[in-house]
Amino acid sequence: MGKSRQLTDQERDERREKDRERLENAARELLTSDGWARWVKVRSSVGLGRYSLRNQWLISADCAKRGITPTHVAGFRAWLSLNRVVAKGSRAIYILAPVTVKDHDAAGEEGAEKRRTFFRAVPVFDVAMTEVLPGTEPVPLSPPSQPITGDSHAHLLTPLENLAAELGYSVRQLPLEGGTEGWCDYERREIVVNEQLPANAQVRVLVHEVAHGLGVGYKQYGRERAEVLVDTVTYVVLAGQVGLDVGGESIPYVAGWGEAGELDAIREYAETIDQIAHRIEDAILPAGARVPVDQPRELGRAA
Protein backbone atom coordinates (compact mmCIF):
# COMPACT_ATOMS: atom_id res chain seq x y z
CA MET A 1 0.00 0.00 0.00
CA GLY A 2 1.46 3.35 -1.03
CA LYS A 3 1.91 6.32 1.22
CA SER A 4 -0.93 8.85 1.36
CA ARG A 5 -0.29 12.11 -0.43
CA GLN A 6 0.92 14.96 1.75
CA LEU A 7 -1.23 18.06 1.75
CA THR A 8 0.03 21.26 0.21
CA ASP A 9 0.34 24.39 2.33
CA GLN A 10 -2.72 25.81 0.60
CA GLU A 11 -4.79 22.70 1.39
CA ARG A 12 -3.70 22.84 5.02
CA ASP A 13 -4.68 26.51 5.24
CA GLU A 14 -8.08 25.73 3.70
CA ARG A 15 -8.70 22.94 6.24
CA ARG A 16 -7.70 25.18 9.13
CA GLU A 17 -10.03 27.90 7.89
CA LYS A 18 -12.92 25.41 7.73
CA ASP A 19 -12.15 24.25 11.27
CA ARG A 20 -12.13 27.86 12.48
CA GLU A 21 -15.50 28.42 10.80
CA ARG A 22 -16.93 25.30 12.46
CA LEU A 23 -15.78 26.53 15.87
CA GLU A 24 -17.15 30.02 15.24
CA ASN A 25 -20.56 28.68 14.19
CA ALA A 26 -20.65 26.25 17.12
CA ALA A 27 -19.88 29.06 19.58
CA ARG A 28 -22.60 31.27 18.08
CA GLU A 29 -25.19 28.64 18.97
CA LEU A 30 -24.60 29.52 22.63
CA LEU A 31 -26.30 32.86 22.00
CA THR A 32 -29.70 31.15 21.77
CA SER A 33 -31.43 29.55 24.75
CA ASP A 34 -31.77 26.24 22.86
CA GLY A 35 -28.12 26.23 21.83
CA TRP A 36 -27.03 27.12 25.36
CA ALA A 37 -29.16 24.31 26.83
CA ARG A 38 -27.71 21.81 24.35
CA TRP A 39 -24.15 22.71 25.34
CA VAL A 40 -24.94 22.57 29.09
CA LYS A 41 -26.39 19.09 28.64
CA VAL A 42 -23.28 18.04 26.71
CA ARG A 43 -21.03 19.43 29.48
CA SER A 44 -23.09 17.73 32.18
CA SER A 45 -22.95 14.31 30.49
CA VAL A 46 -20.52 12.02 32.25
CA GLY A 47 -19.04 10.93 28.93
CA LEU A 48 -18.58 14.41 27.45
CA GLY A 49 -17.38 16.77 30.18
CA ARG A 50 -13.78 15.54 29.82
CA TYR A 51 -13.50 17.04 26.34
CA SER A 52 -12.12 20.51 25.79
CA LEU A 53 -14.68 23.30 25.85
CA ARG A 54 -14.36 23.92 22.11
CA ASN A 55 -14.79 20.24 21.33
CA GLN A 56 -17.91 20.23 23.50
CA TRP A 57 -19.26 23.01 21.27
CA LEU A 58 -18.42 21.04 18.12
CA ILE A 59 -20.08 17.88 19.46
CA SER A 60 -23.18 19.82 20.49
CA ALA A 61 -23.51 21.61 17.13
CA ASP A 62 -22.83 18.51 15.01
CA CYS A 63 -25.33 16.37 16.89
CA ALA A 64 -27.99 19.09 16.82
CA LYS A 65 -27.87 19.06 13.00
CA ARG A 66 -28.53 15.30 13.04
CA GLY A 67 -31.22 15.41 15.71
CA ILE A 68 -29.02 13.40 18.10
CA THR A 69 -28.75 13.98 21.84
CA PRO A 70 -25.18 12.89 22.65
CA THR A 71 -24.42 11.23 25.99
CA HIS A 72 -21.07 9.41 25.66
CA VAL A 73 -18.59 10.13 22.88
CA ALA A 74 -15.28 8.34 22.31
CA GLY A 75 -12.93 7.21 19.57
CA PHE A 76 -13.05 3.81 17.88
CA ARG A 77 -10.40 2.22 20.12
CA ALA A 78 -11.85 3.64 23.31
CA TRP A 79 -15.17 2.00 22.52
CA LEU A 80 -13.43 -1.34 22.07
CA SER A 81 -11.96 -0.99 25.57
CA LEU A 82 -15.53 -0.52 26.83
CA ASN A 83 -16.68 -3.73 25.07
CA ARG A 84 -18.45 -1.83 22.32
CA VAL A 85 -17.77 -1.44 18.62
CA VAL A 86 -18.82 1.33 16.23
CA ALA A 87 -21.75 0.10 14.13
CA LYS A 88 -21.16 -0.28 10.42
CA GLY A 89 -22.22 2.79 8.44
CA SER A 90 -22.08 5.20 11.41
CA ARG A 91 -21.11 8.73 10.40
CA ALA A 92 -18.43 10.15 12.69
CA ILE A 93 -18.51 13.36 14.69
CA TYR A 94 -15.32 15.36 14.10
CA ILE A 95 -13.50 17.13 16.89
CA LEU A 96 -10.11 18.85 16.93
CA ALA A 97 -7.06 17.02 18.32
CA PRO A 98 -3.57 18.43 18.94
CA VAL A 99 -0.73 16.93 16.91
CA THR A 100 2.93 17.66 17.65
CA VAL A 101 5.43 17.37 14.80
CA LYS A 102 9.08 18.15 14.18
CA ASP A 103 9.71 21.60 12.79
CA HIS A 104 12.24 21.04 10.01
CA ASP A 105 12.54 24.78 9.36
CA ALA A 106 13.73 25.72 12.85
CA ALA A 107 16.01 24.38 15.54
CA GLY A 108 16.20 25.08 19.23
CA GLU A 109 19.22 26.13 21.25
CA GLU A 110 22.44 24.21 20.50
CA GLY A 111 20.75 22.38 17.66
CA ALA A 112 18.03 20.86 19.86
CA GLU A 113 15.06 19.50 17.98
CA LYS A 114 12.15 21.95 17.83
CA ARG A 115 8.53 20.89 17.63
CA ARG A 116 5.28 22.65 16.87
CA THR A 117 1.67 21.78 17.56
CA PHE A 118 -1.32 22.11 15.29
CA PHE A 119 -4.86 20.72 15.36
CA ARG A 120 -6.49 18.23 13.04
CA ALA A 121 -10.00 16.85 12.80
CA VAL A 122 -10.37 13.33 14.25
CA PRO A 123 -13.45 11.07 14.28
CA VAL A 124 -15.38 10.17 17.42
CA PHE A 125 -18.71 8.38 17.89
CA ASP A 126 -21.63 8.61 20.31
CA VAL A 127 -22.71 5.50 22.20
CA ALA A 128 -25.88 5.46 20.06
CA MET A 129 -23.58 4.67 17.10
CA THR A 130 -22.11 1.58 18.79
CA GLU A 131 -23.06 -2.03 19.45
CA VAL A 132 -22.07 -4.37 22.28
CA LEU A 133 -19.27 -6.72 21.30
CA PRO A 134 -20.67 -10.27 21.10
CA GLY A 135 -19.93 -12.39 24.16
CA THR A 136 -19.05 -9.38 26.39
CA GLU A 137 -20.70 -7.24 29.03
CA PRO A 138 -20.58 -3.51 28.24
CA VAL A 139 -18.79 -1.34 30.79
CA PRO A 140 -21.27 0.90 32.67
CA LEU A 141 -20.95 4.47 31.38
CA SER A 142 -22.84 6.50 33.98
CA PRO A 143 -23.21 6.36 37.75
CA PRO A 144 -26.71 5.46 38.92
CA SER A 145 -28.79 8.60 39.41
CA GLN A 146 -29.91 9.31 42.97
CA PRO A 147 -32.69 11.65 44.17
CA ILE A 148 -31.76 15.04 45.62
CA THR A 149 -33.97 14.20 48.64
CA GLY A 150 -31.79 11.30 49.84
CA ASP A 151 -28.48 10.92 51.65
CA SER A 152 -26.60 8.71 49.17
CA HIS A 153 -23.99 11.41 48.52
CA ALA A 154 -23.33 12.51 52.08
CA HIS A 155 -19.71 11.42 51.61
CA LEU A 156 -19.20 14.40 49.27
CA LEU A 157 -19.81 16.96 52.02
CA THR A 158 -16.32 16.55 53.48
CA PRO A 159 -14.35 17.04 50.22
CA LEU A 160 -16.54 20.05 49.40
CA GLU A 161 -15.81 21.51 52.84
CA ASN A 162 -12.11 20.82 52.26
CA LEU A 163 -12.25 22.68 48.93
CA ALA A 164 -13.97 25.61 50.65
CA ALA A 165 -11.17 25.62 53.24
CA GLU A 166 -8.57 25.73 50.44
CA LEU A 167 -10.32 28.86 49.20
CA GLY A 168 -10.21 30.40 52.67
CA TYR A 169 -13.83 29.73 53.65
CA SER A 170 -15.22 28.01 56.73
CA VAL A 171 -18.45 26.01 56.38
CA ARG A 172 -21.21 26.00 58.99
CA GLN A 173 -24.46 24.03 59.11
CA LEU A 174 -27.22 26.06 60.77
CA PRO A 175 -31.03 25.73 61.00
CA LEU A 176 -32.35 28.28 58.50
CA GLU A 177 -35.96 29.39 58.16
CA GLY A 178 -38.10 30.73 55.34
CA GLY A 179 -36.87 28.37 52.65
CA THR A 180 -33.30 29.71 52.78
CA GLU A 181 -30.85 26.99 51.78
CA GLY A 182 -27.54 28.76 52.32
CA TRP A 183 -25.23 31.58 51.33
CA CYS A 184 -21.62 32.59 50.72
CA ASP A 185 -20.39 35.53 52.83
CA TYR A 186 -17.37 37.05 51.05
CA GLU A 187 -16.46 39.43 53.87
CA ARG A 188 -16.57 36.87 56.68
CA ARG A 189 -15.17 34.16 54.37
CA GLU A 190 -17.95 31.85 55.46
CA ILE A 191 -20.37 29.48 53.73
CA VAL A 192 -23.59 28.62 55.56
CA VAL A 193 -25.74 25.59 54.71
CA ASN A 194 -29.20 24.78 56.05
CA GLU A 195 -28.68 21.75 58.30
CA GLN A 196 -32.36 20.84 58.00
CA LEU A 197 -31.89 19.81 54.36
CA PRO A 198 -31.24 16.15 53.46
CA ALA A 199 -27.56 15.37 52.78
CA ASN A 200 -27.92 15.30 48.99
CA ALA A 201 -29.56 18.73 49.00
CA GLN A 202 -26.76 20.02 51.23
CA VAL A 203 -24.31 18.78 48.58
CA ARG A 204 -26.19 20.84 46.00
CA VAL A 205 -26.06 23.95 48.20
CA LEU A 206 -22.33 23.49 48.87
CA VAL A 207 -21.53 23.09 45.18
CA HIS A 208 -23.50 26.27 44.46
CA GLU A 209 -21.83 28.31 47.22
CA VAL A 210 -18.32 26.97 46.52
CA ALA A 211 -18.81 28.10 42.90
CA HIS A 212 -19.46 31.58 44.28
CA GLY A 213 -16.32 31.23 46.39
CA LEU A 214 -14.33 30.38 43.27
CA GLY A 215 -14.83 33.92 42.04
CA VAL A 216 -18.38 34.23 40.73
CA GLY A 217 -19.55 37.19 42.77
CA TYR A 218 -22.22 39.84 42.29
CA LYS A 219 -19.64 42.63 42.03
CA GLN A 220 -17.91 41.02 39.04
CA TYR A 221 -20.96 39.76 37.13
CA GLY A 222 -24.07 41.34 38.63
CA ARG A 223 -26.59 39.31 40.61
CA GLU A 224 -28.52 37.80 37.68
CA ARG A 225 -25.50 36.65 35.67
CA ALA A 226 -23.65 35.41 38.75
CA GLU A 227 -26.60 33.25 39.78
CA VAL A 228 -26.97 31.85 36.26
CA LEU A 229 -23.26 30.94 36.21
CA VAL A 230 -23.27 29.16 39.59
CA ASP A 231 -26.64 27.49 38.90
CA THR A 232 -25.21 26.15 35.65
CA VAL A 233 -22.05 24.93 37.41
CA THR A 234 -24.25 23.17 39.97
CA TYR A 235 -26.33 21.51 37.25
CA VAL A 236 -23.24 20.42 35.34
CA VAL A 237 -21.46 18.92 38.36
CA LEU A 238 -24.45 17.16 39.90
CA ALA A 239 -26.02 15.82 36.72
CA GLY A 240 -22.65 14.67 35.37
CA GLN A 241 -19.97 12.73 37.21
CA VAL A 242 -21.69 12.95 40.60
CA GLY A 243 -24.93 11.25 39.62
CA LEU A 244 -27.57 13.30 41.46
CA ASP A 245 -30.93 13.64 39.77
CA VAL A 246 -31.54 17.28 38.90
CA GLY A 247 -33.64 16.47 35.84
CA GLY A 248 -36.55 18.53 37.12
CA GLU A 249 -34.48 21.69 37.25
CA SER A 250 -34.44 23.96 34.22
CA ILE A 251 -31.16 25.10 32.68
CA PRO A 252 -30.70 28.80 33.50
CA TYR A 253 -30.10 31.28 30.70
CA VAL A 254 -29.91 35.06 30.37
CA ALA A 255 -31.07 36.58 27.10
CA GLY A 256 -28.47 39.05 25.83
CA TRP A 257 -25.49 37.88 27.90
CA GLY A 258 -23.39 40.75 26.63
CA GLU A 259 -25.00 43.88 25.24
CA ALA A 260 -21.79 44.56 23.29
CA GLY A 261 -19.53 41.81 22.05
CA GLU A 262 -22.13 39.10 22.75
CA LEU A 263 -20.09 36.23 21.31
CA ASP A 264 -16.95 37.10 23.26
CA ALA A 265 -19.01 37.49 26.44
CA ILE A 266 -20.78 34.16 26.18
CA ARG A 267 -17.52 32.38 25.32
CA GLU A 268 -16.06 33.81 28.52
CA TYR A 269 -19.07 32.69 30.57
CA ALA A 270 -18.91 29.17 29.13
CA GLU A 271 -15.18 28.99 29.86
CA THR A 272 -15.79 30.14 33.44
CA ILE A 273 -18.46 27.48 33.96
CA ASP A 274 -16.28 24.75 32.47
CA GLN A 275 -13.22 25.67 34.54
CA ILE A 276 -15.09 25.98 37.84
CA ALA A 277 -16.97 22.74 37.23
CA HIS A 278 -13.68 20.93 36.56
CA ARG A 279 -12.19 22.36 39.78
CA ILE A 280 -15.11 21.05 41.84
CA GLU A 281 -15.24 17.70 40.04
CA ASP A 282 -11.51 17.18 40.56
CA ALA A 283 -11.94 17.89 44.28
CA ILE A 284 -14.80 15.46 44.92
CA LEU A 285 -14.14 12.57 42.52
CA PRO A 286 -11.56 9.85 43.19
CA ALA A 287 -8.65 9.58 40.76
CA GLY A 288 -9.40 7.26 37.85
CA ALA A 289 -13.16 7.46 38.35
CA ARG A 290 -13.88 8.73 34.86
CA VAL A 291 -14.66 6.82 31.71
CA PRO A 292 -11.47 6.02 29.74
CA VAL A 293 -10.62 8.06 26.65
CA ASP A 294 -8.72 7.27 23.49
CA GLN A 295 -4.97 7.45 23.13
CA PRO A 296 -3.17 9.76 22.58
CA ARG A 297 -4.52 12.64 24.69
CA GLU A 298 -6.13 14.01 21.57
CA LEU A 299 -9.50 13.64 23.20
CA GLY A 300 -8.63 15.56 26.34
CA ARG A 301 -8.89 19.26 27.14
CA ALA A 302 -6.12 20.49 24.86
CA ALA A 303 -8.17 21.57 21.85
Image (spheres, grey):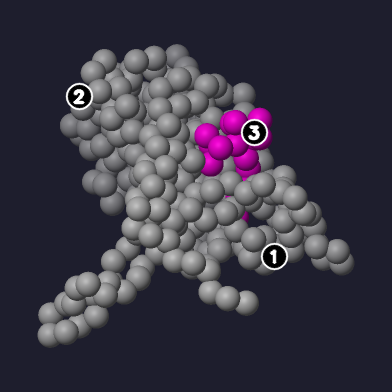
Q: Position of residue 87 (x, y in %)?
A: 76, 53
- Give the vertical position of 68 relative to 15 (above or below): above
The local crowd at label 1, few if under 14, some if 14 to 19, many if 20 or more residues have their Cα within 10 Å, is: some
C-alpha gap between disc 1 and disc 3: 24 Å
Residue pictured at 50% horizontal, 49% vertical: 95
- 20 relative to 71 in the view: left or right: left
Find out whether the residues at labels 3 and 2 contact each other: C-beta distance under 8 Å: no
- Tell me the amino acid under the disc marked 2: Lys
Q: Earlier in the sequence, mark 1 or mark 2?
A: 1
Q: Earlier in the sequence, mark 3 or mark 2?
A: 3
- Tell me the amino acid under the disc marked 1: Leu
- Give the vertical position of 250 relative to 54 (above or below): above
Which residue in the protein does label 3 denote? Answer: 66
- Give the vertical position of 280 relative to 24 (above or below): below
Of tags 1 and 3, the one toward the viewer is 3
Residue pictured at 56% horizontal, 37% vertical: 62
Residue pictured at 58% horizontal, 46% vertical: 93
Which residue in the protein does label 1 denote? Answer: 80
* Magenta segment includes 64: yes
